[in-house]
Amino acid sequence: MLRKTLKGFAFATAWAVFGCSSSAGELGSKAPAPAETSVLDACLDFAARLCADAAGCCQAVYNAFEQEACVATFRREVCRPSADAVQAGRATFDAGAVEGCLLAHAEAHRVCVPNWAETLELNRAIYQACRVIDGTTEPGRGCTTAVTCKRPEGTGTAVCNKNLCQVVELLPEGAECEFPSGDVSVCDAGLTCDTPGIGIIGVCVKAVLPGQACDASVLESTQCGLGSYCDVKTSSCKLAENYGDVGCAQSTECISFECDRIGNQCRAAAAVVSAVTCSGL
């Protein structure tokens, strides 16, 4: 079940951070045609540079990389919708955020296959630096694409979930939270949501630290926080370190949050780049 956590708060791919990040620009409403061309050109340049920088990680994970296919996919999935949204006055563009965004992604490409703690920090940097496009539609209002959804200030992004704009962010201690499944915000490092299950609102509280005692009678528990698990043998919290090997009894032991109970093997941990990003497939 926790594997679905990666859907909503997995590493923030370039599809998300260029297409629905925050900005203070006002292009689109004043000069539609020039703004559309400016955004499209800037996005394609961004795509070319980001794709090239991702090549090493792509080769390491998928043994494949196609620069032209990567840029073509980016054009179709991100650049065209972003340019159209700005032209229609449903999003704004800030060219000054591009360089910082590329630097944040370069660090992610260096890590390539992050554990949960690294995912939080990489996302934190990207959410803060990649404020290139910002939609104008407030959370809770209708949408057909995340490009038009307005991002929150700070460490968060916006998604279009079930045709409604929704904020996904890192939550501080004491904030209300949901069970980590799907497109939901998650508690920040060192915290966990005390909700007993899906559909019940909880609060972000301090997680049990690695090495400290935990209740091992509850499998798949998040008492140790995401990225850690309660070891059934020692009844103490341990950091998840299994990137895809055999030897798991519960999904929380896996970096990927998914354990094949039949083979007792973790699903391979997700990379910061997807097969689509790497080769357009």
Image (cartoon, rainbow, N blue to C red):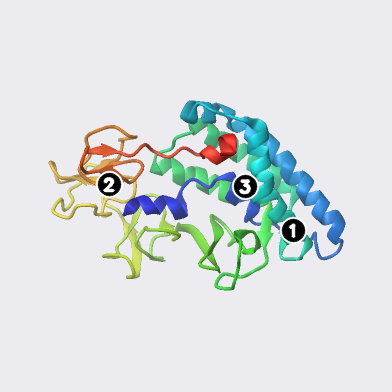
Judging by the rendered image, the residue that carries numbered circle 3 is 129
Label 3 to label 1, Cα distance in Å? Answer: 23 Å
What kind of residue is marked 2?
Ser
Label 1 to label 2, Cα distance in Å? Answer: 41 Å
Judging by the rendered image, the residue that carries numbered circle 1 is 84
What residue lies at 42% left-to-right and 50% top-to-bottom? 6
What kind of residue is marked 1?
Asp
Residue 260, image x and y in percent? 26, 42
Residue 206, image x and y in percent? 31, 56
Quarter of the picture containing the N terminus is: bottom left
Question: Relative to 215, is 122 on the left or the right?
Answer: right
Q: Please, what secondary structure does the residue beneath circle 1 have?
A: helix
What kind of residue is marked 3?
Ala
Q: Which mark is residue 1?
A: none
Asked if the residues shown at circle 3 and circle 1 are in contact, with their CB atoms under 8 angstroms apart, the answer is: no
What residue lies at 76% left-to-right and 49% top-to-bottom? 40
Judging by the rendered image, the residue that carries numbered circle 2 is 251
Comparing 90 with 93, the one in front is 90
Comparing 281 with 108, the one in front is 281
Question: Relative to 73, is 92 on the left or the right?
Answer: right
Quarter of the picture containing the C terminus is: top right
